[in-house]
Amino acid sequence: MNIQRVDLNLLVYLDVLLRERNVTQAANQLNLSQPAMSNGLRRLREVFNDPLLVRTSDGMTPTERALELEPLVRDILSKVDQALQPTAEFDPGSAERVFRIMASDYAESTLLPALLAKLRKEAPGISLDIMTPSDVSFLDVERGKVDLVINRFDSMPQSFHQNTVWTDSFSCLLSVDNPLLKDFTLENYLKAQHVWVSKTGMGVGVGVNPEDVQRLGWVDSAIAKLGKKRHITVFTRHYQAAMILAERNDLVVTLPSLAAQLQHDNPRLVIKTPPLDIPPLELKLAWSPLLQHNPANRWLRQLIVETGREVSWDH
């Protein structure tokens, strides 16, 4: 078919339909009526000689042809978006807007204070709306409803762009009254009562299975390689809660070192190096391909990476 005879707006329709997999929701995204979107889907089926989306018990399911087209269409629209972006750079000094960021409380407590200090100087009109990982889904990010996400990720959609904010080691927090401090060996560490803390990725969390070592994360995987396991008394997704629990004289908290350093001046806690080697973790910054070329988003990404480098160097 000659491209001159094809309405290229149909590619926008197809992109949104494949994201939403629902005609009504796709119409709402594009501020169209449902009949107009249904007509668009009909025309798309004629262009590609394929049903593209088929109604099943799971809703509108893409055909094999639609799944082949999905990355191609998004790449085309991304390039068009890049071409249409204003040539003028984002001016942070005069900008007034809110950036919506999803961040774990580990990232929030270690990175954001330094980031806010920079924003006060460089962009006083900018505000941050910080959301928790449980508030956001991968689909929200893909649609550009969230500007950036900052966390540790076991997996991420291939379409997302990402950068490393920093690499962090692990430290242990113990009460000054914890008897384990007298002989902080691996053997005694494993005999102790532990607080497990982690919030990886995004979305609503699920219950922890203490026997599923791979899903328990860095610390327990490192212990498992030694043929050992630790006794976990409390599972939490909140680093601040874990640090408060560390003040008990019978608990050990193993967590990222930059988080542990927040308690450096706490007279009730001691920071110790773990008695085993634990591979470092990466704090990641990720964003939607829809925002890859957005000048404001690009400026904020650069500022976050720069801030992360400074924070990690200071420690």
Image (tube, helix red, strand yellow):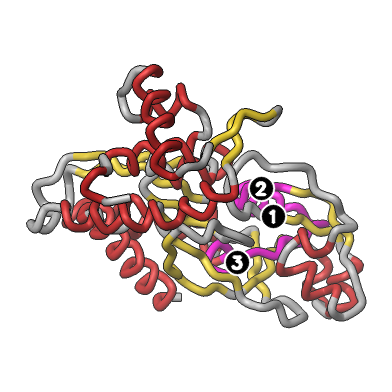
Whole-number angstrom distance, CA of label 3 to CA of label 2: 13 Å
Say which label, 1 or 3, has the lower sequence index: 1
Q: Quadrant of residue 229?
A: bottom right
Q: Nearer the viewer, residue 108 or 290?
A: 290
Q: Nearer the viewer, residue 165 or 60?
A: 60
Whole-number angstrom distance, CA of label 2 to CA of label 1: 5 Å
Q: Is the C-beta separation of discs 3 and 2 under 8 Å?
A: no
- Count neighbours of disc 1 (C-alpha within 10 A) and say few if under 14, some if 14 to 19, many if 20 or more: many
Helix, strand, or loop for circle 3?
A: strand
At label 3, the amino acid type is: Pro
Q: In the rendered view, does 48 fall on the left or right side of 33?
A: right
At label 1, the amino acid type is: Val
Q: Nearer the viewer, residue 26 or 101?
A: 26
Q: x, y percentage for residue 179? A: 83, 67
As drawn, 36 above or below 274:
above
Q: Residue furthest front?
A: 1
Q: Is residue 108 magenta?
A: no
The residue singled out by tag 3 in the image is 256
The residue singled out by tag 1 in the image is 197
Query: What residue span does the magenta drawing correspond to?
Result: 236-260
Q: Quadrant of residue 282?
A: bottom right
The residue singled out by tag 2 in the image is 237
Q: Nearer the viewer, residue 270 or 84?
A: 84
Query: What residue is at 63 percent from the left and 47 percent from the top?
Result: 238
As drawn, 32 above or below 290:
above
Say which label, 2 or 1, has the lower sequence index: 1
